[in-house]
Image (cartoon, coloured by chain):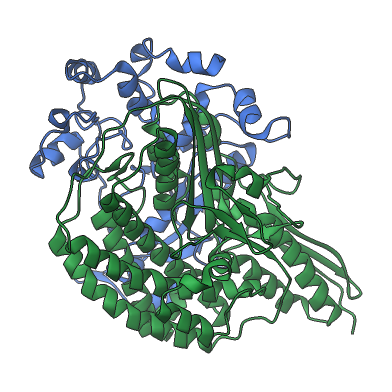
Chain colours: A blue, B green
């Protein structure tokens, strides 16, 4: 489809391979894919880097001959397991695209309840098929992750450029806090705003804190993080354990770390029982 | 010749989410025409139970990747109504400006990227980059402007960061707003040029009498809160929304369906134009009239034109809003929040139609019950009825399957459905 866009691209005088790319979505809002169309200023340059062969939300037709698959969303039903396995068989590189694909995203908040409870809450006795929300890697191996809810389009472009050029993709090891300081923001703790900037992986250029909204950890844990220390600092600033856990569990990135902090948060269970 | 054909569109393209069209015609007689929604539910209404109020706008915005701003604002309005809060005039204006720019970016996305390829007989916008470069650049320019203003006012174009219960975490720079003012005036020219392009497209000739539901304007073309109205004469208060939506479950869809006075009703740009035509900005009204769009228009394909008309309206009104905002000094961006027990409803006109969020809170501000009624879920039954009528009419006229398939796809696309949103 985008063949007509093909103008030979070169890098240091060497022709660059234009990979065939496909986009897929499981349980999600499809917002991460739309972030690409939302990048009006550089969209055309970006499209010249790759050949989009499947993008259901934006194009009719397409082929299953692709090298890189971007998969958005989490797995919440058996047919999605099958679809994902098929994509994995075809793609040389499978990219978990956005927080739902990387960690389960906001969808995994339903895992706080039994599936019978969530079904009944929304559909009553009407039969409806659903399973616990899982990240892609719980079903198939994932080659690359692009974090964020939503993904940051500048970061996507950087990563895709590296993929196209065949160079290594790396992520910042440090937390959002570093970017926030570099951006000259007043620490949100001082403004009374809870924030997971100290433990969340950077790369978003402190998107939320720079807008005076505390970080909710959508990009998951930084390589070098001290979650226990952060919780105790937040408690010193007067944030409740519930507020801290709300943020830690929101996107699923910290699910391996939060059980120890959860004990004080029985209010949910209380509400649930009433 | 009497037509016999089977049309089976699995995962319709150029719409948000997953839906299928199935039509079967035997010797010119329609045997089946079905609009199936197979999207996986994400259970937002269940996963919010037990969460504190401040989680709701942040999480509910994630219901939709196109109209996240609308969901966030509906969520905020429901919470503010439950807690008895009234937003400041400044907050009200900033929210409408933000809302308008989401409407513009969404309508432009639909008109140019999702809808126009059908009229130009291509599969996507991509080939148009070479064949119609100026048009694609114009679309990108309009979308970029809308998104830039969303970034400036809401902090982020998708899943906004600054929008909170009580107002905004921070305010835009006035110098920035000033710059946007002149870009908005240029956008009017682009939209009028868009109108000329759409005049060269021939919309399918199909009419089915339909009930249209939207917010009810009193003095202006409404987008956030107020009474609810239908073209069949039903009027209800915002907190009586359940009497407008009447949701029920069907086997062919993981999304709920709705009905009111008839078997189905429609929401969206066409519903708003049909109900609130008198309150359109004169420039927008002129565009409507030039397309023969006036109340009550029953051709669902005209929703495309209604979106174009609304694009002109929101740009004109945004210029006036910016003038207002620039003309008065900033006041505090955010009010304090005191949670209380109660139920709150927020009705907001998002690009695809009227959206309701409703939460019940306990005395500590925790969510006991949550209900979100999505525009596209209200449209599904109407799409089904349209599809059956369309297939029946054209099958009888002997239309060939390839052409009928395209018309059926274009019909569903006219509603600009947001399917994953409708299932949520």
Q: Position of residue A51 (x, y in %)?
A: 42, 67
Q: Position of residue A175 (x, y in %)?
A: 19, 34
Q: Position of residue B284 (x, y in %)?
A: 44, 78
Q: Which of the 4 image quarters holds residue B369? A: top right
Give the left or right position of residue A223, taking residue A130 as reference: left
Q: Nearer the viewer, residue B201 or A38?
A: B201
Q: Is residue A57 above or below residue B398?
A: above
User: What residue is shown at x 64% (from left), y 49% (from top)?
Assistant: B244
User: What residue is shown at x 68% (from left), y 50% (from top)?
Assistant: B258
Q: Which of the 4 image quarters holds residue A247? A: top left
The mark tally for this picture is 0
Is residue B123 visible in the rendered image? The answer is no
User: What residue is shown at x 33% (from left), y 28% (from top)?
Assistant: B338
Q: Nearer the viewer, residue A131 or B276?
A: B276
Give the left or right position of residue A96, taking residue B333 as reference: right
Quadrant, the N terminus of chain B? bottom right
Residue lying at the far top in this picture: please name it.
Answer: A263
Is residue A270 visible in the rendered image? The answer is yes
Q: Position of residue B370 (x, y in %)?
A: 53, 33
């Amino acid at each position: 489809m985008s063949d007509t866009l093909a103008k030979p691209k070169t890098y240091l005088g060497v022709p660059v391979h234009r990979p065939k790319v496909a986009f897929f979505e499981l349980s999600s809002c499809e917002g991460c894919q739309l972030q690409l169309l939302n990048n009006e200023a550089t969209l055309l340059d970006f499209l010249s880097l790759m050949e989009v062969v499947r993008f259901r939300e934006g194009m009719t037709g397409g082929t299953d001959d692709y090298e890189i698959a971007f998969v958005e969303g989490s797995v919440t039903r058996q047919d999605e397991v099958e679809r994902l396995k098929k994509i994995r068989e075809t793609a040389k590189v499978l990219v978990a695209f956005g927080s739902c694909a990387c960690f389960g995203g906001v969808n995994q908040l339903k895992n706080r309840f039994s599936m019978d409870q969530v079904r009944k809450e929304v559909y009553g006795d009407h039969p409806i098929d659903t399973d616990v929300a899982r990240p892609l890697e719980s079903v198939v191996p994932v080659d690359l992750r692009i974090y964020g809810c939503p993904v940051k389009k500048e970061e996507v472009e950087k990563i895709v450029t590296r993929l196209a050029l065949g160079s290594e993709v790396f992520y910042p090891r440090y937390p959002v806090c570093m970017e926030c300081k570099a951006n000259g923001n007043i620490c949100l703790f001082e403004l009374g705003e809870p924030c997971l900037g100290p433990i969340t992986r950077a790369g978003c250029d402190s998107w939320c804190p720079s807008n005076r909204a505390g970080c909710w950890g959508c990009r998951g844990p930084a390589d070098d993080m001290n979650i226990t220390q952060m919780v105790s600092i937040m408690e010193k600033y007067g944030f409740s354990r519930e507020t801290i856990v709300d943020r830690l569990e929101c996107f699923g990135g910290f699910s391996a770390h939060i059980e120890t902090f959860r004990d004080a948060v029985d209010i949910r269970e209380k509400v649930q029982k009433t | 010749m009497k037509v016999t054909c089977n049309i089976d569109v699995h995962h319709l393209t150029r719409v948000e989410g997953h839906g299928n069209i199935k039509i079967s015609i035997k010797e010119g007689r329609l045997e089946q025409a079905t609009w199936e929604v197979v999207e996986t539910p994400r259970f937002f209404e269940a996963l919010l139970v037990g969460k504190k109020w401040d989680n709701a706008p942040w999480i509910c915005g994630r219901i939709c990747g196109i109209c996240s701003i609308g969901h966030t604002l509906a969520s905020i309005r429901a919470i503010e109504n439950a807690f008895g809060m009234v937003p400041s005039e400044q907050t009200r204006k900033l929210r409408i400006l933000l809302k308008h720019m989401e409407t513009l970016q969404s309508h432009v996305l639909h008109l140019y990227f999702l809808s126009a390829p059908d009229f130009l007989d291509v599969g996507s916008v991509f080939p148009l980059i070479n064949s119609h470069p100026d048009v694609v650049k114009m679309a990108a320019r309009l979308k970029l402007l809308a998104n830039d203003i969303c970034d400036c006012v809401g902090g982020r174009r998708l899943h906004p960061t600054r929008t909170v219960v009580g107002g905004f975490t921070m305010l835009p720079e006035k110098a920035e707003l000033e710059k946007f003012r002149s870009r908005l005036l240029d956008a009017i020219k682009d939209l009028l040029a868009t109108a000329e392009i759409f005049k060269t497209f021939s919309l399918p000739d199909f009419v089915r009498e339909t009930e249209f539901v939207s917010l009810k304007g009193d003095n202006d073309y409404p987008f956030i809160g107020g009474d609810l109205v239908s073209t069949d004469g039903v009027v209800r208060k915002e907190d009586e929304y359940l009497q407008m939506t009447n949701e029920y479950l069907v086997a062919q869809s993981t999304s709920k369906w709705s009905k009111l006075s008839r078997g189905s009703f429609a929401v969206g740009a066409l519903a708003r134009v049909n109900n609130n035509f008198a309150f359109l900005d004169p420039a927008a009204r002129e565009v409507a009239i030039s397309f023969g769009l006036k109340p009550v228009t029953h051709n669902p394909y005209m929703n495309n034109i209604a979106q174009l008309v609304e694009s002109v309206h929101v740009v004109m009104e945004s210029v006036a809003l910016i003038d207002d905002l620039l003309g008065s000094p900033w006041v505090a961006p955010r009010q304090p929040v005191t949670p209380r027990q109660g139920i709150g409803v927020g009705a907001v006109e998002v690009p695809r139609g009227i959206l309701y969020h409703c939460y019940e809170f306990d005395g500590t501000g925790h969510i006991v019950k949550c209900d979100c009624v999505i525009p596209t879920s209200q449209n599904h039954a109407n799409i089904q009825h349209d599809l059956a009528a369309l297939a029946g009419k054209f099958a009888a006229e002997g239309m060939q399957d390839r052409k009928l398939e395209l018309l059926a796809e274009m019909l569903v696309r006219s509603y600009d459905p947001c399917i994953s949103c409708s299932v949520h």
